Image (spheres, coloured by chain):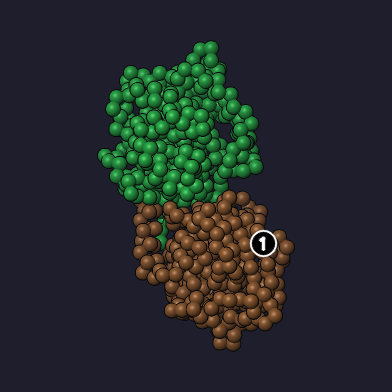
Chain colours: A brown, B green
Amino acid sequence: MSLLVTGSIGIDTVETPYGKRQDVIGGSAVYFAYAASFFTPVRLVGVVGEDCQVDFARLFAGRPVDLAGLERRAGSKTFRWHGSYVQDMNQAVSIQTQLNVLAERAPRIPEGFCASPFVFLANTHPVLQQQMLDCLQLPRLVVADTMNLWIQTERKELLNLLKRIGGLVLNDGEARLLTEKNNLIEAARQVLDMGPRFVVIKKGEHGCLMCSGGQTFVLPAFPADRVVDPTGAGDSFAGGMMGYLATQDDFSAAALKRALALGTVVASYTISDFSLSGLQGITRGDIDRRCEQFQAAMKF
Amino acid sequence: MSLLVTGSIGIDTVETPYGKRQDVIGGSAVYFAYAASFFTPVRLVGVVGEDCQVDFARLFAGRPVDLAGLERRAGSKTFRWHGSYVQDMNQAVSIQTQLNVLAERAPRIPEGFCASPFVFLANTHPVLQQQMLDCLQLPRLVVADTMNLWIQTERKELLNLLKRIGGLVLNDGEARLLTEKNNLIEAARQVLDMGPRFVVIKKGEHGCLMCSGGQTFVLPAFPADRVVDPTGAGDSFAGGMMGYLATQDDFSAAALKRALALGTVVASYTISDFSLSGLQGITRGDIDRRCEQFQAAMKF
């Protein structure tokens, strides 16, 4: 079933121990959409400025990504990010961030997208995330991401959002900040008390954990011997996870667990090259085969 | 089959967010021996000073731990460590370390222990580790631990040791230091080139990975919601792992994988309380049941 994603579209400059790429496509919605499109049709909602040279139709050629919600706004400039992983592959240092069009009004969700059954609200201001929700008609599952900035500055609005979503995806530092619990299982359980039916805590190269109901699920990262560029790993993880869930009839523990494993595997392709290169040229079959390898690497 | 361990026996003072314990039993050989004794008979080789008040026979009462290699040395003082996890449960701050008897000559391996088929050389000077090896008659499997200090100051002797052992257990920081590889899979493969047939990299709360032959195995930590005192986690992990391997006919990938899982589970009991309290009172049945829970928490 259709999966709507709203999030950033950006032009990135990225430096890692493997080199530097200037002005490549990035942004949470782009990584998410590409990753999810291996599983289900995706509806992308995002905004770029008139300076954006990217041919999105070509970027997503052959992939089931509907670009009707992509706005190219006259008079505005595209979001840009310049980051470096040269010192630490687990933590980007932001050299420059130009919000540009992201600091303006949010893009409009096209009429035809409002009944999307599955929705992912990538990280942005929690008021904007709630405005997006207001435009939607009874989605089956809404999952959101967030970040330190909103936890620290917009806690009340974030807590309002949490009451309205089915799942929250966040990283370990954010989970600790949100709950003031150091132990991640305790933190996850406290997030569940805030509203969501499930919470996924991403730990970068250390994998992820999920709590839902009384269940706890843990996964290591896929054991990758070549990490070229970690940019987009978390968004690709969420894309793979949501893409798979959008093909499922229920959100049972079993479905959520397989979704996390597939998200982990898709992210392992993303980080194997710069920008979208690691995802371009792979197939659902490749993902499923690597998922079996992943399973074998943990089996005892 | 019998499993010999040589390592430290210490009197610890430990501070964690859950409180402080003064002058409790600790040391790598003690944690290792207790953990391994759930699986196989253990032979403990270590030395304390005449100041040591611990009744070891009582400490290990009911457990198959042979204390014939435990030396109480007149005129010497017991190793003491005072550490704090108050700021960071993943990294102890050493407030005071008194090597005392550990800075003197090593304890002697009793004649009757020299034919032990399984041997664990806990972290100590690599020359001492090799001297221990010289006393042993063709063990089936020798596994060693090491630390930053020896990697930095005794690299040549450590490399000599690595040529003589079947397995190396070390943590992520040590693996990176030893190999100058940031990626842990690359680091593990490089350790294999130095001699051991398998290498286990411990990542604390993030689990572990193992490389052996062409295989890579990854495990998260057991999802524990109450970590009281991380002291001894790594030694208990190694004890559970080696204890299980000592009951196996081969060191196949399957045996090594189950050994790692059992080590992970035993360590989860250790960290649930101070000193040995988390291990006291549990049974092999408890370990096996938690191992099944662990398996379920990763299954997809």
Q: In which quadrant will I find the C terminus of chain B?
A: bottom left
x, y (%) of residue A66? Answer: 51, 82
Q: Nearer the viewer, residue B257 or B13?
A: B257
Picture coordinates of residue A148 (x, y %)?
66, 60
Q: Nearer the viewer, residue B272 or B6?
A: B6
Q: Residue at x 51, y 29 (%)?
A: B153
Relative to A44, say whether A20 is above or below. Answer: above
**Residue at 56% across / 84% down in the picture?**
A68
Residue A130, image x and y in percent? 66, 75
Q: Is residue B2 visible?
A: yes
Which residue is found at the position 58% from the left and 82% from the top?
A69
* Depth check, front residue: A193 or A236: A236
Residue B41 in the figure: left or right of residue B11: left
State left or right for residue B213 relative to residue B293: left
Tell me the crowding category of disc 1: few under 14, some 14 to 19, or many 20 or more residues within 10 angstroms, Cα based.
few
From the viewer's perspective, is residue A88 above or below residue B283?
below
Above or below, comparing residue A225 to residue A269 in the picture: above
Q: Can residue B33 be seen in this snapshot?
A: no
Q: In the drawing, does residue B40 fall left or right of residue A228?
A: left
Coordinates of residue A38 in the picture (x, y in percent):
43, 73
Residue B15: name its quadrant.
top right
Please state if A162 lies on the left or on the right of A213 as rendered: right
The residue type indicated by label 1 comes to Gln
Residue assigned mark 1: A96
Mark 1 falls within which chain?
A
Residue at the extreme bottom of the image, as rendered: A111
Helix, strand or loop at label 1? It is strand
* Count of marks overlaid on the render: 1
